[in-house]
Image: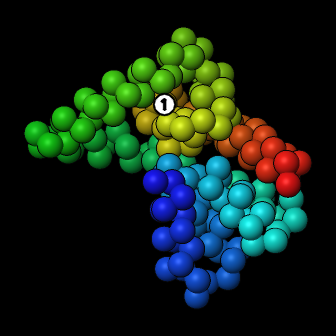
Amino acid sequence: MKEDIKQFLVENLSFLPNEVIVVIVSAMPILELRGGIPLGYGFGFDFWPAVGLAILGNLLPIVPLLILFRPLSTFLMRYRWYKRFYDWLYERTLKNSKNVERFGAIGLILFTAVPLPTTGAYSACVAAALFNIRFHYAFLAIVTGVLIAGLGVGIAMYSIF
């Protein structure tokens, strides 16, 4: 599914410069920089441009998510469909973020930095909101995690090929 989404975006955004496509793909949920760095590699970018653009794209949604998730969720909780979605999201996040709950912002770094499915900046923002981690701690932790993940994925991608 992840490759299908990435391929769809690349095909439909082909009128944009490749650098912008890498940023957009990296800003998308599910794909994040785990999709952007290989895409940059595929476009022929050197290590630092690919990693830098992917990190930039992955950082773009952090502030809006941290600021808007809780108030928007509070507003939408009046709808049954959102309540079911929120409960599902809460259970999924809780299951995948034991370290966040236990270690707070430090756990959030680890949660964001490990490049596995269902971890990353989007999930970390949700976890920060659910566990009431203060904005500046959450922001710094998620940015740190994104930087670690970007370097890790970049090194893995560029050293393998």
Residue found 57% across the figure and 40% down from its top: 120
Give SS at disc 1: helix
- Residue 67: percent from the left, percent from the top? 44, 45
- Residue found at the far front of this picture: 161
Instruction: Rate crowding at label 1 as few (under 14), some (14 to 19) or many (20 or more) other CA atoms within 10 Å.
Output: many
- Residue 51: percent from the left, percent from the top? 78, 56
Instruction: Return the residue at label 1.
Output: 128
* Residue 63 in sight in this render: no
Q: Is residue 136 above or below residue 47?
A: above
Q: Is residue 149 above or below residue 114?
A: below
Q: Quadrant of residue 52?
A: bottom right
Residue found 65% across the figure and 74% down from its top: 20
Left or right: 137 with respect to 96? right
- Residue found at the far bottom of this picture: 15
Left or right: 54 with respect to 73? right
Residue found 58% across the figure and 88% down from its top: 15
* Residue type for callout 1: Ala
* Screen quadrant of the C terminus: bottom right
Q: Nearer the viewer, residue 7 or 98?
A: 7
Q: Is residue 52 above or below residue 73?
A: below
- Residue 150: percent from the left, percent from the top? 74, 46
Q: Nearer the viewer, residue 158 or 58?
A: 158
Residue found 37% across the figure and 43% down from its top: 69
Q: Is residue 142 above or below residue 62?
A: above
* Residue 24 in sight in this render: yes
Left or right: 129 with respect to 89? right
The structure's colour scheme is rainbow
- Residue 41: percent from the left, percent from the top? 78, 63
